[in-house]
């Protein structure tokens, strides 16, 4: 598992980029003073953007799972994560008349699924990178976020937007850190091998 993630560190860099994009857009919409019609359009665009970004994240995850470097390694968690994230994105976009309140429920269950995958992957990684904690924090954050969105009062648009932005920001930070950590874990042995061969 660790070898797959190191060879595909770009996967988490892409996840981070998507999360940054989504977080910036959500915070922009939340902070903007918009007329009713534009506000409805902005909220609808958040739903569509989330769906497409989730689908894209799933596709990148599946691409990493099927990459040549993953052959001969255990890639089941990546496959499960990729398929689940893809389905979450498709459901959000395909289901008709989804507003922010139903979206919050969908994302809540989706985040529980992501949390399980991230925590399991974090457990695998920590067998070899003992100081790696980015993925574990991302998994715990996903679980907490899902629990928050399942509360009874999580129906106001302001509440949903606030926590969507916070979750996207946490995901962006942890995925950025993990991508850098994995990239470094791959580049340091490469430098050592080159130095030994000189």
Image (cartoon, helix red, strand yellow):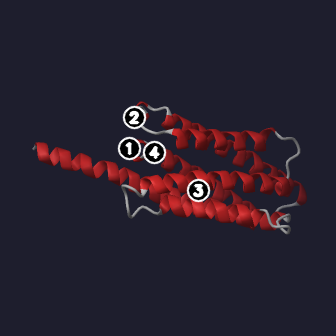
Does any portion of residue 33 appear in the rendered image?
no
Would you call the spot at circle 3 few (<14 residues within 10 Å), some (14-19), or many (20 or more)? many
Query: Do the CB atoms of the residues marked 1 and 2 lie less than 8 Å apart?
Result: yes
Q: At numbered mark 3, what does the secondary structure look like: helix, strand or loop?
A: helix
Q: Which residue is mark 4?
A: 10
Closest to the observer: 16 or 131? 131
Quadrant in which residue 58 is drawn:
top right
Is 100 rendered above or below residue 2? below
Q: Position of residue 88 (x, y in %)?
A: 71, 44
Sequence-earlier tag: 3 or 4: 4
Instruction: Say which element carries label 2.
Output: helix
Question: Of helix, strand and loop, which one carries label 4?
Answer: helix
Q: Earlier in the sequence, mark 2 or mark 4?
A: 4
Q: Which residue is mark 1?
A: 3
User: How far apart are the two marked residues, 1 and 4, measured between alpha carbons?
Assistant: 13 Å
The answer to whether residue 48 is seen in the rendering is yes
| Helix, strand or loop status at disc 1 | helix
Of the two numbered discs 1 and 3 on the same chain, state the one appearing first in sequence.
1
Distance Cα–Cα, label 1 vs label 2:
8 Å
Q: Which of the marked residues, 1 or 4, is nearer the chain's N terminus? A: 1
Distance Cα–Cα, label 2 vs label 3: 28 Å
Of callouts 1 and 2, the N-terminal one: 1
* Residue 20, numbered circle: 3
């Amino acid at each position: 598992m660790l070898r797959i993630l190191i060879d595909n560190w770009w996967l988490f860099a892409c996840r981070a980029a998507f999360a940054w994009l989504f977080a910036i857009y959500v915070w922009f919409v939340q902070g903007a003073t918009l007329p009713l019609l534009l506000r409805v359009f902005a909220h609808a665009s958040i739903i569509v953007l989330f769906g497409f970004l989730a689908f894209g994240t799933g596709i990148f995850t599946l691409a990493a799972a099927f990459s040549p470097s993953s052959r001969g390694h255990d890639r089941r968690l990546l496959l499960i994560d990729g398929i689940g994230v893809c389905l979450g994105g498709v459901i959000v976009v395909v289901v008709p008349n989804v507003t922010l309140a139903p979206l919050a429920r969908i994302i809540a269950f989706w985040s529980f699924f992501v949390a399980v995958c991230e925590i399991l992957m974090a457990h695998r990684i920590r067998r070899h990178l003992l100081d790696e904690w980015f993925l574990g924090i991302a998994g715990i954050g996903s679980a907490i976020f899902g629990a928050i969105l399942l509360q009874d009062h999580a129906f106001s648009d302001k509440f949903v937007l606030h926590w969507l932005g916070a979750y996207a920001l946490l995901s962006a930070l942890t995925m950025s850190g993990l991508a850098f950590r994995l990239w470094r874990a791959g580049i340091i042995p490469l430098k050592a091998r080159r130095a030994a061969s000189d």
